Every structure is written in structure tokens, then in C-alpha cells.
């Protein structure tokens, strides 16, 4: 299949791909997504094929405005509207009870559905022009780091999808926050662009799913099926080094051997001269680290490093999402520098 490259202005051509049941690479503020008409089971099935995605891992339904929630969701609690009012359009996905109109292909047979209203202007224009709910996961091959620009998505999807729209690099860089509103208290299933602290301002108490901070044991079922897979993973094994940034950098310097790579804060790059190094941003700029983290992980797949050492921010604010992605890339192989 020839994958059509579309510019941000070719909204109508992009919408047409969705309307005719095709697969479209779509820029969003979080990461690039692999979209299809969310009401067309056959089109949605092609998303799973293109990604090699396990069948039990549901997709997110992307809508243009919060008033589309009633079309696809039942028993919507007041909290959903409060969250939508505060954070939509934006990087937050709510898990709600589904209506029967939502195909099983989208929800992987669950009686709930993930709903998001994205903020990226190009993404919004495409959804509005298509006048459809767009089902989409991240645009990577399953198991690889999510793509945060068009070139990264083409690396995985060129020839497998009908088209892709260039919306520039993603402003957030990690996927949406997933909050499950079918439980009381609401449960954070995946940290992302909207922080836990921000959710708590609206919801009060929020439970954090154990899959966010630790490896799920055999037989444990995380509530977001996506959280059980080793994810965001480069080819080489990753070790995350926790601790004060200078301590963690020194720890890595001491343990680093030939043929190993480093993901570090910008300040520490000179320590690792002679090794492949990917800086993820200044130590105090977590938003930049979020934008860079997937690119850094992806970079090492083009090298022959045997092992990757990674510095990691504190789990506050969007640092919770960055550390979650790094820890998952490491299969929760984490050491303390101190
Ligand atoms: P992705 O955007 O590629 O990370 O894929 C969507 C994510 O949303 C996956 O981690 C799914 O497990 C999660 N998700 C989608 N729908 C649901 C749902 N109904 N319940 C729990 N998690 C969901
Ligand atoms: Mg994904």
C-alpha cells in the first residue's frame, strides 16, 4: 500500500480516508495516533493488524466536543462533565460505561469505553470534517515507543496505512492521562499529559492503579489492558537510575561499560563522552523531558548499544508520566543511586 503524505491543510483528503474505512496517521498534542472510523468494525480491525496489537487491548474514541459523550456513553457521572469542562480539549481520556452503538472492536469487548477530545488543531479539523468518532491508539508498532513526529510514525507504518498528516512534533510527547470514572474513587489507570495533582483538584480523592508504579505479577489483571504489556521498549534492555540528578549521573558514569548508551538530563551529557547519549532535556524541565522521552528511546533502536542507562525525573506533575514510560521501557528494572 502506498501511504499518502498529507499536509496539515489537506483536512478534507484526510477525512475522506476515514470516511471510506481507511487507516490514517493523525497528529495529536500527545503522540501521533493511528485512526479509523470508530463506528466501522472492519476499519478498526485493520488498526490491530497494522500495529500487531493484541486483540484484548482496547482503543480510545476521539470526539470533537464533550456533547458527543451521550452518543456513546451511558450513566455518565457529573464528574465526567466537570473533567471535560476543565481539561477538554486536551490530553485526558475518561473511561465510561459504553452504549451498544460502540463496536466491540473498539472496546475489546469491555462494557466500558475510553473517550477523549483532543486539542491539536489539525486533529480537531480532521475529526470535524469526517464528522465521525475516531478510534485510535498510538501510531507505533505494538511494543515500540510511541511516535511523536511524522518521521517516527512512518518508520513503523509506511506502506501499512492509507495516509498520514504532518502536524509537526507533538507538544506534550506522552500519551493522554487515563482516568476511570466507573469506580469510586475514580482511578488513574495511566499517567499522562494531565497530572494526577490536576485531576485531584477536580475529583478530590483519586486512586492510583498499581500498574502505574510497579510490574504486574503473573495472573494480575490491570484495569487498562494496555498496562500489562512491556511497552515503549527499545531493543536494548534499559536500567533506570533513581536519585538526585547528580548522584544518578555519577552512578551511571561508574557503571557504564563499552557499547552501552545513556539517556540523561542535558546538564550531564559531558560526563558520558565517547558513548551514545540522548539528552532528554534540562533536569528541571519535565515538560521538555516528556516531549523527548520517546524519541530518546527510539533513537537507540538505530544503534547497536547492548544496554541503556536512564536518568529519571521525580514522579511529581508530568514527571509521573515520564517516569512511568521510562520504568515500563525498563520492565521496572530500577536501581537507586544512593
Ligand atoms: P494507546 O493510546 O496506544 O496507549 O492505547 C489506548 C490505551 O487506552 C491502552 O492502554 C488501553 O488499555 C486503554 N484503554 C482503552 N479503552 C479502555 C477501557 N475501556 N478500559 C481501560 N483501559 C482502556
Ligand atoms: Mg500505545
Image (tube, rainbow, N blue to C red):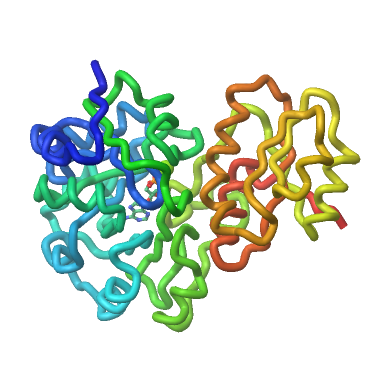
Q: Nearer the viewer, residue 164 or 111?
A: 164
Q: Which residue sits at x=11%, y=53%?
A: 101
Q: Which residue sits at x=63%, y=46%?
A: 280
Q: Is residue 251 left or right of residue 203?
A: right
Q: Which residue sits at x=65%, y=41%?
A: 330
Q: Nearer the viewer, residue 155 or 269?
A: 269
Q: Is residue 42 visible?
A: no
Q: Is residue 298 visible?
A: yes
Q: Which residue sits at x=54%, y=52%?
A: 290
Q: Nearer the viewer, residue 219 or 7?
A: 7
Which residue, as the protein is rendered here, is positioned at the far top? 1
Q: Is residue 222 left or right of residue 283?
A: left
Q: Is residue 156 left or right of residue 73?
A: right
Q: Residue 29: x and y, percent? A: 37, 52
Q: Is residue 173 above or below residue 78?
A: above
Q: Is residue 110 above or below residue 197?
A: above
**Residue 74 in which image quadrant:** bottom left
Q: Residue 125: x and y, percent? A: 18, 50
**Residue 154 in which image quadrant:** top left
Amino acid at each position: 500500500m502506498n501511504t499518502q503524505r498529507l499536509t496539515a491543510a489537506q483536512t478534507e483528503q484526510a477525512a475522506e480516508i476515514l470516511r471510506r474505512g481507511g487507516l490514517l496517521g493523525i497528529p495529536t498534542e500527545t503522540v501521533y495516533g493511528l485512526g479509523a472510523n470508530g463506528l466501522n468494525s472492519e476499519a478498526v480491525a485493520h488498526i490491530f493488524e497494522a500495529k500487531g496489537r493484541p486483540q484484548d487491548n482496547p482503543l480510545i474514541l476521539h470526539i470533537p466536543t464533550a456533547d458527543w459523550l451521550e452518543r456513546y456513553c451511558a450513566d455518565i457521572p457529573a464528574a465526567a462533565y466537570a473533567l471535560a469542562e476543565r481539561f477538554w480539549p486536551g490530553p485526558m481520556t475518561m473511561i465510561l460505561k459504553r452504549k451498544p452503538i460502540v463496536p466491540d472492536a473498539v472496546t475489546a469487548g469491555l462494557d466500558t469505553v475510553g473517550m477523549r477530545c483532543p486539542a491539536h488543531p489539525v486533529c480537531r479539523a480532521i475529526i470535524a470534517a469526517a464528522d465521525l468518532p475516531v478510534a485510535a491508539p498510538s501510531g507505533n508498532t505494538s511494543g515500540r515507543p510511541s511516535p511523536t513526529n511524522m518521521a517516527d510514525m512512518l518508520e513503523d507504518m509506511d506502506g501499512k496505512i492509507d495516509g498520514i498528516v504532518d502536524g509537526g512534533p507533538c507538544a506534550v510527547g506522552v500519551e493522554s492521562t487515563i482516568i476511570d470514572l466507573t469506580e469510586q474513587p475514580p482511578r488513574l489507570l495511566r499517567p499522562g499529559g494531565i497530572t494526577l495533582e490536576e485531576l485531584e483538584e477536580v475529583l478530590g480523592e483519586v486512586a492510583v492503579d498499581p500498574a502505574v508504579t510497579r510490574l504486574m505479577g503473573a495472573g494480575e489483571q490491570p484495569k487498562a489492558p494496555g498496562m500489562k504489556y512491556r511497552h515503549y521498549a527499545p531493543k536494548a534492555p534499559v536500567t533506570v537510575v533513581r536519585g538526585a540528578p547528580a548522584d544518578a549521573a555519577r552512578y551511571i558514569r561508574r557503571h557504564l561499560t563499552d557499547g552501552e548508551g545513556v539517556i540523561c538530563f542535558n546538564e550531564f551529557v559531558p560526563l558520558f563522552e565517547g558513548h551514545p547519549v540522548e539528552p532528554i532535556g534540562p533536569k528541571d524541565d519535565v515538560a521538555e523531558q516528556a516531549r523527548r522521552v520517546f524519541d530518546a528511546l527510539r533513537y537507540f533502536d538505530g544503534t547497536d548499544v547492548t544496554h541503556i542507562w536512564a536518568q529519571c525525573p521525580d514522579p511529581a506533575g508530568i514527571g509521573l508520566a515520564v517516569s512511568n514510560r521510562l520504568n515500563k521501557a525498563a520492565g521496572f528494572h530500577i536501581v537507586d543511586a544512593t
